[in-house]
Structures are given as structure tokens and as C-alpha cells.
Image: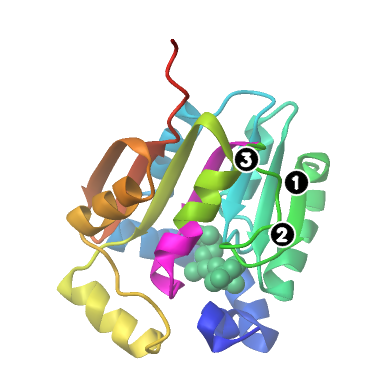
Amino acid sequence: MTARDGTTEWTGRRGRLGALLMVSPIRRLEESLLGCSGMKLLRHVFSSLRDGATVLDAGCGSGYLSLPIAAKLSFGKVIGVDLSDEMLAALGRRARAKAVDDRVQTLKAPVSSTGLEEGSVDLVVSNNLLHELQDTAAALAEWKRVLKPGGRMVLSDFRSTRLVRFIMSREHGEEASNPMDVEDMASLLEQAGLEKVEVIPCRHKLLALAEKPSPRAL
Ligand SMILES: C[S@@+](CC[C@H](N)C(=O)[O-])C[C@H]1O[C@@H](n2cnc3c(N)ncnc32)[C@H](O)[C@@H]1O
């Protein structure tokens, strides 16, 4: 795992600690101070989720989105993709503890090259990942590739506010992308060839919704 992948901070001892913090009450406090509540994000995810769906959680961490999605599905699956062994191990443990492990698959891969079959996923979700990537367009291209026509994306990430830029400049090095504003996020999704793009600012965060075009009926 290299700094180019933006994941060195999520490995080893830091990774194990991060995996715990990401699902702790401290996390809920951070979410409510900086952005939309996790519940608001999940409402958007659930409104794009059909039972039996295959969901890709890009940069899944220890399961902040994967686990509630798996709990909502009676069949179907969430594929949690991450490069950190510690995060994937924590997700596996938590899925077993919550008895949803039959609906959670972990995959160690870069989010821009998952190896998943083209057109095999109904919904792509991602939270707090995009700002860590060096090449966000490559990630979007991969997520579009694996989506079925008409499949949806529900993405959330930090917004480019003064506070967020200050925090990011201390947390991440030059290898990471800058946090985006509404226009940057919308144009990233449009340039990836997605449609029905909607970007909702939520204090220091952004919520983005988009869809992979379906072939036009003749
Ligand atoms: C800030 S954490 C967010 C985790 C989770 N989505 C959440 O909201 O709790 C970012 C996660 O993305 C993973 N990650 C970063 N760059 C990645 C890449 N290029 N490919 C796969 N995973 C990556 C990190 O290992 C980490 O687990």
C-alpha cells in the first residue's frame, strides 16, 4: 500500500484505531458537527436500494455504510472494497457480530480498479473517500463501469470550506485530492458520463446522487 493510494494512514496500528473510531460515538459527534447526520446519508442510500441488490461500498472502512445496508437487505450483498487489511478485518468481525456476514463480502482492491465484472452492481456508495484519492476521475470511471445501466451512485464527502481545507492540509499530504465544492463534484460526475446528477451541500459535507444512463429505447 503506498501513499499514492492515500491509505497509509489506515494501516497498521493507526488502521486498527481508525477502524474503531469510525464506528464510535466520537464519529457521530464529528458527523453532526461537520455535516449531514449519518441518518440523512442513509435515507438517501436506502431510497436508492432495492432488496436483492448488489451494492459496492468504495473505501468501506470498518463498515459505516456497509453494515446498515446489509442489515436492510434480506437478500443481495454489499461488497466492501478497501486497501486496508485492518479495515477489512474489522468489517468482517462486525458483520459476523451483527449476523449479516452472509450479505457482506470484503474485497482488498484499489477503488479505481476493483476487478468486479462490468455491469454487475446496482448501487455504488462511498463516504469520506474521494478527498483521499489522487485520481477521482479514475475512481468514477471504474464505479460507472461496474454499475448496471440505470444503476445509482450515492456519494458523500467533505466540502471545500475553510475549516475543511485547514483540517485536510494537516491530515493529508500532497497525494490526496482537494475537498470539492458543489460545482467540482457536479462536473466530476457529469464528466464521468453520469446523468440525473444532484449535489446537495450539507454544512461541511456534500451529498451527491447520480445514475448510469440506460440505453435509450428505440
Ligand atoms: C476516511 S475512511 C472512510 C471509511 C468509511 N467509508 C467510513 O465512512 O467510515 C477512507 C477509507 O478509504 C480507504 N481507501 C483510501 N484510498 C483507497 C483506495 N485508493 N482504494 C481503496 N480504499 C481506499 C482507506 O483505507 C479507508 O478505510
Residue at 44 percent of width and 12 percent of height? 217
* Front residue of this view, candidates 30 and 85: 85
Residue 10, given in percent of the width and then of the height, sits at: 59, 79
Q: How is the image coloured?
A: rainbow
Q: Which residue is mark 3?
A: 55
* Circle 2 SS class: helix
Q: CA distance from mark 3 to mark 2?
A: 15 Å
Residue 164, given in percent of the width and then of the height, sits at: 26, 73
31 vs 179, left or right, is: right
Query: Looking at the image, do the residues carrying marks 1 and 2 touch, with CB atoms under 8 Å apart?
Result: yes
Residue at 21 percent of width and 60 percent of height? 181
Residue at 58 percent of width and 75 percent of height? 18
For the question of whether residue 124 can be seen, the reply is yes
Q: Is 202 in the magenta?
A: no
- Please give the range of residues in magenta: 121-139
* Front residue of this view, candidates 211 and 21: 211
Q: Which residue is mark 2?
A: 91
* Circle 3 SS class: strand
Q: Which mark sits nearer the N-terminus, 1 or 3? A: 3
Q: Which residue is mark 1?
A: 104
Residue 168: quarter of image: bottom left
